[in-house]
Every structure is written in structure tokens, then in C-alpha cells.
Amino acid sequence: MSGYENLRIILLFLARIKIRSVFEERRKAMVRQLIKRGFFGILLVLVFFLAVPVVSPQDFPKKPVALIIPFGPGGSHDLTGRALSSVAPDCLGVPLPIHLKGGGGGAIGSDFVASAIPDGYTLLFDRCLITNGTGSKRRYT
């Protein structure tokens, strides 16, 4: 072997050591980061489970929840709303009366829900969407 070959082998060996040390430093940093994340994750889970018993559920609903359908009777929206109203007392514990407020392509019923008190006891059943009407308060004339 010539001196050039020996120098090349030594440089390759040193480069491997340098690469190993860089990878070792990165690996140690990743392990530290995972330990730190794991610690914070465990801390978050503990806080969640310790805070859950402190929070008590609200007594909602206390009175019947009105379901406003902004279309006339006899359509698919009416049948779907009545089907929903028939099973809602089992889930909610209170009746879900249906109020049909047709006219204006749904504008009259939507305006009624938008102007109702935003307490969650008046819901809008617009086609296949149930909302509480807390959006914009537009008046249709």
C-alpha cells in the first residue's frame, strides 16, 4: 500500500467516527425529546383524569326542546323531523315538539330561530342540518 492509500483509509475511518458521533448526538437528542414529550403527555393525562371528577354535568335539557322546521308539512323534512321527535325523548329525557314554520323558502322559520333566545332550547331543522340558529341575525322583508 502506498502512503496515499493509507491516508485515504485513515480519512475514511475518521469520517466514519465523525458520522457515528453526529448520529449518536442526534439519537440522544431524539431520546431526550421523546422523554420530555412522554413526561408532558403523562402529565396531561393525569391532569385530565384528575380534573374530570371536578366537572359536573349540567342539567340540560330541563324543558322541552323545540325543533323548528322552516318548511310546510308533508315533505321529507317533515317525516325526518317527526321520526327524530319520536326517538328524542328516549335520549334527551324531554319531548321534542315540532313546529312547522313554512314560507319564504325557509326564511321565516330560519328568522324565527335566529331571533330566539340562544339558550339551546330552539333548534332549526333545515333540510338535513340541525343548528341552534346562532349565526347572523338577518331580517327578511
Image (cartoon, rainbow, N blue to C red):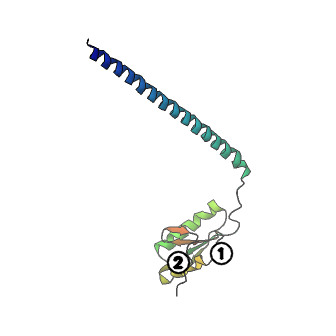
Q: Residue furthest front?
A: 3
Tell whether 92 sits left or right of 56.
Answer: left
User: Is 52 on the left or on the right of 31, as rendered?
Assistant: right
Which image quarter holds the N terminus? top left
Residue at figure coordinates x 45%, y 29% from the top left: 22
> Given the image, on which type of amino acid does mark 1 rest?
Ile
Q: Which residue of the protein is positioned furthest toward the bottom in this rendering?
A: 141
Rendering quarter of residue 91: bottom right
- Residue at the spot 67% in from the left edge and 42% down from the top edge: 46
Q: CA distance from mark 1 to mark 2?
A: 17 Å
Percent coordinates x, y for residue 75 in the rendering: 47, 75
Say left or right for 64 vs 32: right
Residue hosting label 1: 117
Estimate the x, y position of residue 107 in percent, counting from the top left: 51, 81
| Residue 45 placement (x, y as % from top left) | 63, 42
Q: Which mark is residue 70?
A: 2
- Front residue of 72/49: it is 49
Q: Nearer the viewer, residue 141 or 43?
A: 43
Mark 2 residue element: loop
Residue in the foreground of this view, choosing between 140 and 105: 140
Of helix, strand and loop, which one carries label 1? loop
Please tell me the numbered disc located at residue 30: none
